[in-house]
Each structure stands twice: as structure tokens, then as C-alpha cells.
Image (tube, rainbow, N blue to C red):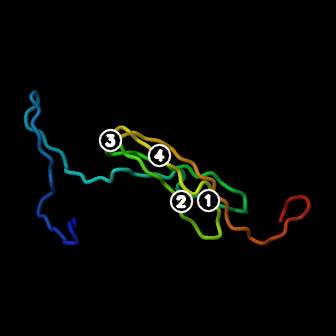
Amino acid sequence: MTAGGQVLNTPSPFFFRWTDPAAGELYRPFEVRPRVTVQCGDKVAIFAGDTPKKITLRLKSHSPNVSGAVRLKGPSAWKIAPASRPFALPGKYEETEVTFEVSPAETGRRRRPDGRS
């Protein structure tokens, strides 16, 4: 674990401790989470030609009242639309999906009149 650029070595794991009136003293592992996590719907997208594909991202908040914009970054010759998508997640653990259309760079191959390469 690091803090302020310094490496912290701990001989034992960190735990969060609290007291529940009915259950008594409870513990759970201490976790540091980002305010938002992103998962890609498909782990891999294969572009066999120059046909665009839809890429879906699932955003999950780990804090209340999280908002911002998400964007995809790809090779400069590729087209990604829209450039960014705004999102707002008012509740903790809320989720939403955003979709982008990704078009690969044109390969420069000429197509025959029947549509094949």
C-alpha cells in the first residue's frame, strides 16, 4: 500500500471495526474504493472489417452523488461517437450503462460491387 508516494508495509491486514447494538463488535476488511468503477460489457471486440460496433460500459458508484463524463480512447484513425457521455449516479451502489459506437480506421481496400472485399 502507498500513501503520499510512500510505501507502507503492514504486518497484518487493516480492518474496519464497528459496534452493532444487537450483534456486538463487528469487523470487516478495510477497503479503499474509487468513487466509480467501470466494466466493459464485452471483454473483447473483434473488428473484422470496417463495420462499426457498439461498445457498452457499465458504471457503478461507490459513493453518493457521483457525476461526470466517461469517454473511450482509441487509435487516432478510429472514430468513436459520441466523444464523451455524461453520467449522474445519485445513490451509492447505483449503476448505469453508456454506449459508444466505434468505427475502425478504413483499411483502404476497395470493395467489389457485390459488397465483398
Q: Residue furthest top?
A: 22
Q: Earlier in the sequence, mark 3 or mark 4?
A: 3
Q: Which residue is mark 4?
A: 87
Is the residue under label 1 in contact with that under label 2 (CB below 8 Å)? yes
Q: Earlier in the sequence, mark 3 or mark 2?
A: 3
Q: Earlier in the sequence, mark 2 or mark 4?
A: 2
Neighbour class for label 1 at 10 Å: few (<14), some, many (≥20)? many
As measured in the structure, the alpha-carbon distance from the residue carrying label 3 to the one carrying label 1 is 29 Å
Q: What residue is rendered at 24% in x and 52% in y?
A: 31
* Residue 34 percent coordinates (x, y): 32, 53
Q: Which residue is mark 1?
A: 80
Neighbour class for label 3 at 10 Å: few (<14), some, many (≥20)? some
Q: Secondary structure at mark 2?
A: loop
Is the residue under label 2 in contact with that under label 3 (CB below 8 Å)? no
Which amino acid type corresponds to the residue marked 4 in the rendered image?
Answer: Phe
Q: Which residue is mark 2?
A: 72
Q: Secondary structure at mark 4?
A: strand
Q: Quadrant of residue 89?
A: top left
* Residue 11 percent coordinates (x, y): 11, 64
Quadrant housing the N terminus: bottom left
Q: Which residue is mark 3?
A: 64
* Residue 79 percent coordinates (x, y): 65, 62
Which amino acid type corresponds to the residue marked 3 in the rendered image?
Answer: Pro
As measured in the structure, the alpha-carbon distance from the residue carrying label 3 to the one carrying label 2 is 24 Å
As measured in the structure, the alpha-carbon distance from the residue carrying label 1 to the one carrying label 4 is 17 Å
As measured in the structure, the alpha-carbon distance from the residue carrying label 2 to the one carrying label 1 is 7 Å
- Quick check: 114 left or right of 24? right
